[in-house]
Image (cartoon, rainbow, N blue to C red):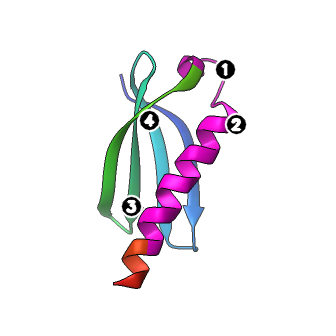
Amino acid sequence: MHELIWITVLDHRYVVAVTRTGPYQGELTVADGFEIAYCRSIDLMYNALLGPDVSDIAEWRRIACAFVDSRLDN
């Protein structure tokens, strides 16, 4: 069960996606081109049955931005 819940692009380069992996569980990935640069398990509030919760999106953006910023600092 890998259902796409949310996707966005950061800095016109990094594709950030969240997929459902199970009830109340998901996976956040950050891709740079065809390379998965970062991946981690996440919790989904309210199981995201009607779409992602606003607080989930804010947390996903925070996680992805922190990763991208750390990568740019190196």
Q: Secondary structure at mark 2?
A: helix
Label of residue 31 in the image = 3
Rounded to the nearest whole Å, what is the CA distance between mark 4 and mark 2? Answer: 16 Å
In front: mark 4 or mark 2? 2
Q: Is residue 6 covered in magenta?
A: no
Between the residue at mark 4 and the residue at mark 1, the CA separation in whole angstroms equals 14 Å
Q: Which mark is residue 19?
A: 4
Report which residue position mark 1 lands on: 50
Classify mark 3: residues with Cα within 10 Å, few (<14), some (14-19) or many (20+). Answer: some
Q: Residue at x 47, y 64 (%)?
A: 66
Could you tell me which quadrant the C terminus lies in? Answer: bottom left
Query: CB of mark 4 within 8 Å of CB of mark 2?
Result: no
Q: Nearer the viewer, residue 38 or 6?
A: 38
Q: Secondary structure at mark 1?
A: loop
Residue 36, located in which quarter of the rendered image? bottom left
Residue at which label 2 appears: 54
Q: Nearer the viewer, mark 2 or mark 1?
A: 2
Name the side, left or right, on which 32 lies relative to 17: left
- Rounded to the nearest angstrom, the CA distance separating label 2 from label 1 is 12 Å
- Callout 2 crowding tier (Cα within 10 Å): few <14, some 14–19, many ≥20: few
Residue kind at label 4, given as amino acid type: Thr
* Amino acid type, label 2: Val
Examine the rendered structure and indicate whether residue 71 appears above or below residue 30: below
Q: Is residue 64 above or below residue 4?
A: below
Would residue 9 be found to the left or right of residue 67 on screen? right
What SS does tag 3 mark? strand
In whole angstroms, how far apart are the C-alphas of marks 3 and 1?
Answer: 25 Å
Q: Which residue appears at 42% of the width and 15% of the height? A: 23
Q: Residue at x 57, y 74 (%)?
A: 11
